[in-house]
Amino acid sequence: MTPTAPIGSVPTLSIPTLSVPTLSIVVPVKNEAPNIAPLIAEIRAALAGVPHEIVYVDDGSTDDTASILARIAAEAHPTSALIRRRHRISCGQSAAIVTGIRAAGAPWIATLDGDGQNDPADIAALLARAQAEPGLVLIAGHRTNRRDSRVKRLSSRLANRLRAALLRDATPDTGCGLKIFPRDAFLSLPAFDHMHRFLPALFIRAGGRVISVPVNHRPRLRGTSKYGTIDRALVGIVDLAGVAWLQRRWKRPVVEVPEEEAVLF
């Protein structure tokens, strides 16, 4: 006979404990099918000792990106969940990053380009640095030895100098896709197209600090770049003016809490 619980007692339910990841790695991609499986494997190997999840956002790809992500997501992994989101039409890298961070469940976010040029082996050290710093901080990768064409390196160098002069964002390489920051802080920032290029300035505007850390940079082995040089420069000028306007049109308040209210917290 099966034993029954005493009348009036509350049965005890066995609820599985879900581990909350420390870090969500957000990877925006468009037509990067050949790079998806190798990069996911690298991320998982590099972060084997860090509770993490991987969030891929397919920004309207027309290749096999969606099917490859579906296949990998269907394969159970013991320590690293793969979360997928897809834009029906391409909305750009910044929109994909915002979508990924909204879907993320960890308090810390790492952004990573989907072309394989950022090295996942750098993520753990950057996370440790972020967790050791007091206050609001953004850890930005600095590609000290870029493996890009001479034209792309020169255009980026000029753009970084102009940006630093106008925005005073204290960052030598704002274009590096590898960055780590608190999720809640990012979601409080104004969202707009190409905002990912201006995260250091936006974090400083919000009262935070930016720390640049040298990271590895690798040549692209598969696929083709989605960015030109002239088109980025023309759009960047407009964006730069917009962010400069945002900086001027905001005064960061110093909030004082009355003593009788402060004791309640």
Image (cartoon, rainbow, N blue to C red):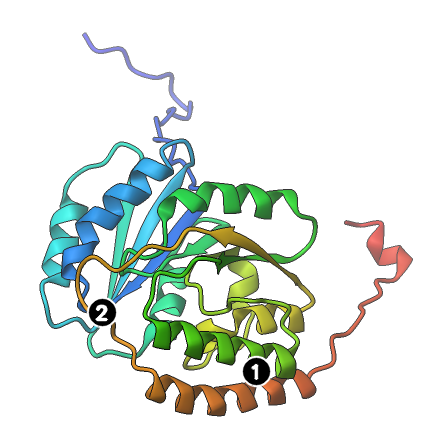
Which residue is at the front of the view, 157 or 209? 157
Q: Position of residue 158 (x, y in %)?
A: 50, 80
- The answer to whether residue 140 is above or below residue 244 is above
Q: Which mark is residue 10?
A: none
- Point out the tag, 2 or 1, that comes first from the N-terminus: 2
Q: Position of residue 2 (x, y in %)?
A: 21, 11
State the count of labels.
2
Q: Position of residue 224 (x, y in %)?
A: 19, 69
Asked whether, in this view, residue 244 is left or right of residue 155, the answer is right
Instruction: Indicate the quadrant where residue 14 lies.
Output: top left
Query: What type is the residue that disc 1 sits on?
Result: Leu
Asked whether, in this view, residue 73 is left or right of residue 6, the answer is left
To which residue does mark 2 refer? 30
Image marks 2 and 1: residues in contact by CB distance under 8 Å: no
| Residue for point 57% across, 84% down | 243
To which residue does mark 1 refer? 162
Instruction: Indicate the quadrant where residue 21 lies.
Output: top left
Q: Tell which tag, 2 or 1, sits nearer the viewer.
A: 1
| Residue for point 32% across, 59% down | 27
Q: Residues within 10 Å of mark 1 (few under 14, many from 20)?
A: some
- The answer to whether residue 124 is above or below residue 168 is above
Which residue is at the front of the view, 182 or 118? 118
Q: Position of residue 137 (x, y in %)?
A: 62, 57
Tell me the element at label 2. Answer: loop
Which residue is at the front of the view, 115 or 262? 115
Which residue is at the front of the view, 252 or 235? 235
Quadrant in which the N terminus is drawn: top left
| Residue for point 64% across, 68% down | 170
Query: What type is the residue that disc 2 sits on?
Result: Lys
